[in-house]
Image (spheres, rainbow, N blue to C red):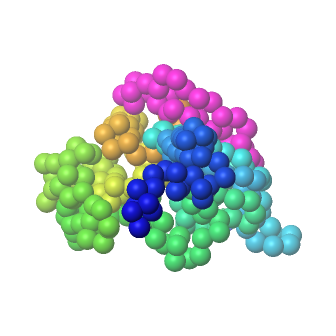
Amino acid sequence: MQQISSFPRNQARRSWFPIGYRSLKPAIAWLISSVMSDSREKAETAAFRTRNLSKVYGTGRSAVRALRGVDLEIGRGEIVVLLGPSGSGKSTLLNILGGLDRASEGDAWFDTQCLTSMNDRDLTRYRRNHVGFVFQFYNLMPSLTARENVELVTEIAENPITADKALGVVGLGQRLDHFPAQLSGGEQQRVAIARAIAKQPEVLFCDEPTGALDSSTGRAILRVLQDVNKKLGTTVLIITHAAATAAMAHRVINFADGAIQDVHLNKTPIDAEGIEW
Ligand code: ADP
């Protein structure tokens, strides 16, 4: 007994391993650090990736090819502007990335989650927890105040900020108890943005958010989106007809006929106030 208890621990271990732990240590450390830095890199850079993403509406003679094999990468925390003529497939792409529609072919990932292999329940959870939407028309409940419209979301979200805070971020902290009819178009769009960001989504999808607004109000709304991106780190995707909006984006994607024509990285995005329409 005496002999066994005094046997050095590491010698006992050595007898189990053909190669000593010490000689393996550098290799193990390298393996762990390379796996960690790889996943960190992915998490920091790619909010979305698509591979050969395709969408066909309808069948036979009436089939419409809305997306034709889109390969795309969107960085986390970027403002991305999608430009292209009407019917070129921008909304279709946004709807698939937002979990509102399904691709016909190809794949799309949000971070490490494959959207194109999710079932309906997973897609609903994805929409509820990770993404917010802003559309051209504000879709507010007319009988509810600004605060109550936002609370519709905060009451069911997993990790919301308060309605008051969300309305503060969009510059409507003084109009909490106003009804939509008492607000201008630009202010109603701010409420819609507050509603979309209140659940703290990682991504905000905006389909023609300034389409119903005059140019100076449109600029103010783009400024709000820029603030959301800066203050909350939200990745923002904006579909627009207004090519000048590209100046405020980190990444500009030009679409035509269901395919990407070119992608432009903008190293010095300007403040939205400086956009010339
Ligand atoms: P954009 O947003 O660039 O205007 P869309 O993505 O809305 O383009 O549309 C791309 C093409 O897909 C268009 O030809 C459009 O008519 C067609 N499309 C879009 N949605 C549907 C649908 N639900 N059913 C059939 N065709 C559709």
Q: From the viewer's side, name the closer residue of 24 and 210.
A: 24
The image shows residue 123 at horizontal and vertical percentages of 53, 70
Q: Name the residue: 57% across, 60% down.
A: 113
Q: Quadrant of ligand 1?
A: bottom right
Q: Name the residue: 27% across, 45% down.
A: 170
Q: Is residue 43 visible?
A: yes
Locate residue 257 relative to residue 238 in the image: left or right. Answer: right
**Which segment is the magenta one?**
247-276
As drawn, the residue found furthest toward the right would be 61
Q: Is residue 31 visible?
A: no
Q: From the viewer's side, name the closer residue of 90 and 120.
A: 120
Q: Is residue 46 above or below residue 58?
A: above
The image shows residue 28 at horizontal and vertical percentages of 58, 45
Locate residue 136 relative to residue 163 in the image: left or right. Answer: right
The image shows residue 219 at horizontal and vertical percentages of 38, 35
Q: From the viewer's side, name the closer residue of 53 and 47.
A: 47
Locate residue 6 relative to residue 20 in the image: left or right. Answer: left
Q: Name the residue: 33% across, 44% down.
A: 232
The image shows residue 169 at horizontal and vertical percentages of 25, 45
Q: Is 199 part of what is drawn in magenta?
A: no
Quadrant of the image for the N terminus?
Answer: bottom left
Locate residue 192 relative to residue 181 in the image: left or right. Answer: right
As drawn, the residue found furthest toward the top would be 268
